[in-house]
Image (cartoon, helix red, strand yellow):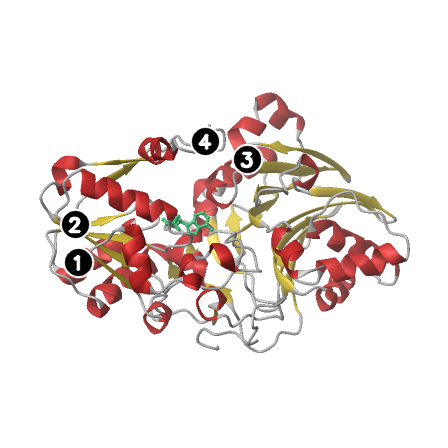
Amino acid sequence: MGYDARLDKIKEECGVFGVFDNDGHDVARLTYYGLYALQHRGQESCGIAVNDNGTILYHKDMGLVPEVFDDVVLNHLKGKIAIGHVRYSTTGASHRENAQPMVVKYRNGQLALAHNGNLVNAAELRAKMEEIGAIFQSTNDTEVVANLISRYRVMSENIEDTLVKVIKEIKGSYAFVILTPHKLIGMRDPYGIRPLCIGRLDNSYVLSSESAALDAIGAELVRDVNPGEIVVISEEGLKSIQTETPGRSCLCIFEFVYFARPDSVIDNVSVHKARVEAGRILAREHPVDADIVIGAPDGGLNAALGFARESGIPYGQGLLKNKYIGRTFIQPEQGQRETGVRIKFNVMRSEIEGKRVVMVDDSIVRGTTTKRIVQMLKKAGAKEVHMRVSSPPYRYPCFFGIDTASRKQLVASNYSIDDIRKMIGADSLEYLSLEGLLKTPVGAKCGFCTACFDGKYPYEVPHEGNKFSCGGGEK
Ligand code: AMP
């Protein structure tokens, strides 16, 4: 697949959840609440599959979790084990057939899979299988993995051995939850790029992309699934299979910067604390004389708090975000774009009028939202707007599950910091250094993928001046 086609392919920016019940819980409802708590990880489609005595029942569709599921559907999804998925995808790949979990029938019965991440060799694996006659119904990576499982299962004693073989074939980022007739399985890629954790609810086990979803159902966080680990939950309890790893991990640093919920804990580090720390370091690296610190909701709020605490400049709420803008928000026509931003955000004039404002955001990707917010602040009477970004310039596209389009659309890839400052109309613009960012997940034991900031991808990617190896704090 050529470079451009590759960039247009689906990027699985998603959330996964799973429950193995030993207490008589309603697994479909627990998964529904779990997915509700993971909605920020994907708003395009969602689905739940349950295992009813070896038969897999499922429901999935385009839309938000409360739009896709109601009591009637959930009452129908009875079983002992469940998995669920929320999915986000880039434009062009928005089809119902790509909604997950993917449910397949093969020689050994039924299987349901849900995936967060992106495989970099899926096209290659798919082409090889197509050459020998395989048929695919969707364009997503998950179907490639389902096919591999089916093939390797023929040569293996059990599903565990099969997955050990599959892990050796697939390259890229993945946090999988898999439902077999009798087991719930979690599987994380050897670099641990996307997060996955294990929770406990009474005597039952839960798997989730983020710990905040465990809190939502009253489950306790046990631990993260390790990079390259396969956890198999069955009547016999939890079994761990540790497969070979490259010896260093590369958790996506952007989970800490923007993607994960601030109330989640990843690798024993609170996402909120890491963001506050980013704001503190940013204030030390790039101080400024100002009257108020505000955050761009919601991503910039925690870092703004850290900036205010470190600098001593009062923290205020300068921007309000409409919480009810969903997928169904009708985008204003070209030329009415201002209306779109005004509906999404409004300025608290009384907080910022006549003041020198520090506005903190977690990242600038394309620069379009930032520009409009700066304009709104100035229009509402801000004397000066000093933009502070709690991560380094976002210069390289992600091939591992964060949707940031191509390099052409990344403003920091094409313009200098001063040009960006002029474009967004700010009085000053400064970014957190990569060194500073890597200090923010205090106590983290893992290393980080920082490819979006330094271009050092953990796997070979097409035409991006790949420097291989993880950039961030190799651990
Ligand atoms: P912009 O100025 O248009 O680049 O928008 C910047 C805003 O986009 C920031 O507030 C970020 O929180 C947010 N953002 C960062 N990454 C993503 C992403 N992958 N998807 C959607 N929004 C994002």
- 95 and 263: which is toward the camera: 95
| Pointer 1 with pointer 2, Cβ within 8 A | yes
Disc 4 from disc 3: Cα separation: 28 Å
- Residue 315: which disc? 2
- Mark 1: amino acid: Arg
Identify the residue position indicated by label 3 in the image. Answer: 32
Residue 175 lies in quadrant? bottom right
Q: Secondary structure at mark 2?
A: loop
Q: Secondary structure at mark 3?
A: helix
Q: Residue furthest top?
A: 72
- 37 and 96: which is toward the camera: 96
Disc 1 from disc 4: Cα separation: 37 Å
Callout 3: few (<14), some (14-19), or many (20+) C-alpha neighbours within 10 Å? Answer: many
Q: Which residue is located at x 42 percent, y 52 percent?
A: 366
Eye-nearest disc, 4 or 3: 4
- Say which label, 2 or 3, has the lower sequence index: 3
Identify the residue position indicated by label 4 in the image. Answer: 331
Eye-nearest disc, 1 or 4: 4
- Mark 2: amino acid: Tyr
Identify the residue position indicated by label 1 in the image. Answer: 309
Callout 4: few (<14), some (14-19), or many (20+) C-alpha neighbours within 10 Å? Answer: few
Question: With 50 as the anchor, is 277 left or right in this view?
Answer: left
Residue 322 lies in quadrant? top left
Eye-nearest disc, 4 or 2: 4
